[in-house]
Amino acid sequence: QVQLVESGGGVVHAGGSLRLSCAASGRTFSSYDMGWFRQAPGKEREFVAVIRWSGGRTSYADSVKGRFTIARENAKNTVYLQMNSLNVADTAVYYCAADRGRATTLRTPEEYDYWGQGTQVTVSS
């Protein structure tokens, strides 16, 4: 069992930056692929970024590529999402998720085994 707790959300002006953190419990954090998703009101949960446990490879949604950076610090059981050049369209609840290594694309919510409670990010114009 893995428990995930996000933090770092808030209100920021367009063009600003935020860094989200996701702290995980459990001794096997380093063997999980870790993803970030977001969900805006009235919309489906969408993929943002993922970092694989093996090799630390990363992948991003086209909408955030070049602006967001995902990173992990296994010694602290933490994954981060650095978000720069934020715009109003980035407003959503952001969730981190963990996969035990069975997923293929890692871009759909159904592939993940554990979820955090989410943290709100609001970008004002």
Image (cartoon, grey):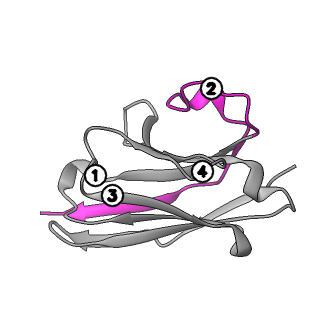
The kind of residue on which mark 4 rests is: Gly
Q: CA distance from mark 3 to mark 2?
A: 23 Å
User: Could you tell me how far apart the alpha carbons at marks 3 and 1 are, in whole angstroms?
Assistant: 11 Å
Picture coordinates of residue 72 (x, y %)?
58, 64
Disc nearest the viewer among 3 and 2 = 3
- Disc number lying in front (3 or 4): 4
Which one is earlier in the sequence, the residue at label 1 or at label 2? Answer: 1
Q: Residue at x 19, y 64 (%)?
A: 85
User: Gap in Å between the C-alphas at discs 1 and 2?
Assistant: 22 Å
Q: Nearer the viewer, residue 69 or 92?
A: 69
Camera-nearest residue between 70 and 116: 70
**For the residues bearing labels 3 and 4, Cβ distance under 8 angstroms:** no
In the drawing, what numbered circle is on residue 110? Answer: 2
The residue that mark 4 highlights is 55
**Residue at 27% across / 38% down in the picture?**
62
x then y, percent, for residue 59: 43, 42
Residue type at tag 2: Glu
Q: Which residues are magenta?
A: 100-125
The residue that label 1 is drawn on is 90
Residue at numbered disc 3: 68
Q: Where in the figure is residue 51, as x and y percent of width and height?
A: 54, 49
40 relative position to 87: left or right: right
